[in-house]
Amino acid sequence: MNDRPVVVVFAYSEVGYRCLKALTGSGANIRAVFTYEDNPDENTWFSSVKALALDNGIEVYTTDGVKDPGSFELIKSLEPEIIFSFYYRDIIPKGILELPRLGAFNMHGSLLPRYRGRACVNWAIIHGEAETGATLHWMTARPDEGDIVDQERVPITEADTAKDVMLKVAGAAEQLVMRNLDLIEAGKARRIPQDHSRATYFGGRKPEDGKIDWSAPARDICNLVRAVTRPYPGAFTFIDGEKILIWKASPLAGVPGAAPGSVLSRDPLVIAAGEGAVRVEEKSVTRDA
């Protein structure tokens, strides 16, 4: 019989999978995992939290959301002493966060307090950041504002796509779980207050947000391309009535006087930007304009 504190996990995506893997590998007393059924309309590139939990004999719940009153009663009946949220997509209500005596903890894919909110890896790349990371923090009613337990930094190279960085962040998150689990179970997790004056916040992104503004500098446009390239919907523009999805691009020196968005070359495709030009290295074309 496992006499360690009872853990309830809310998890999804690759970060969720890696963190759950760290918990199961450590022998944590996981009573249940809450996750999602994969959406057939979504490009599911990450490993399955549900499959991992079932493989380890853990009860799995794929409810419609934790805001449902029935979910609260269910979670309460599990008598969690620790709650973990690893890239779970719903905000966990305050009442649930108050259930575990040892605390509720979230894994966020940035170096808090910067890049609070959603799509934090994508936004970091869009803004040309040279590093990001993972932050394990205490959960509060206001998302991403709780005291920090620990952080792990990861580099962002100029060639990295969002998926590349997400995999790095997932690895960093796994390290944080392994490094702090004993302290959390002992009720000795660190509490480092966030400096809210340094906080930045960004919202979720939609496919239409990938439309390219050619008045921007070429490097910024290329950052957007690698931030939303596969498995994300992609950056796009319109040329001669065709919608061009750009999956890979690099910045070039521009042609003096060229209007932003003008085609400087067809093969290879080179397009003028506000500063410099963009060489399109991989694209697809759709007439669904």
Image: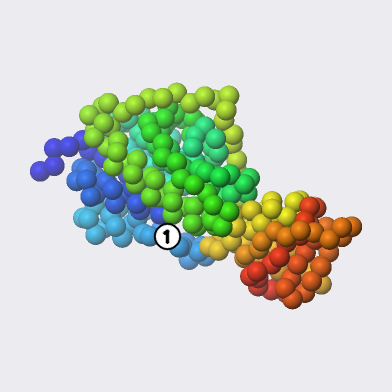
- In percent of width and height, residue 184 lies at 28, 32
- In percent of width and height, residue 151 lies at 41, 36
Nearer the observer, 60 or 67: 60
Residue 86's place in the image compared with 193, above or below, is below
Residue 46's place in the image compared with 186, above or below, is below
Residue drawn at (26%, 31%) of the image:
183
**The N terminus appears in which quarter of the rendering?**
top left
Residue 231's place in the image compared with 168, above or below, is below
Residue drawn at (41%, 30%) of the image:
148
Residue drawn at (26%, 27%) of the image:
187
Residue drawn at (56%, 57%) of the image:
159
Nearer the observer, 278 or 63: 278
In this figure, which residue is indicated by the disc labeled 1? Answer: 46
Query: Could one spot residue 137 in this view of the protein?
Result: yes
Query: Does 41 sit left or right of 76 as displayed?
Result: right
Question: Tag 1: residue type?
Answer: Phe
Residue 257 lies in quadrant: bottom right
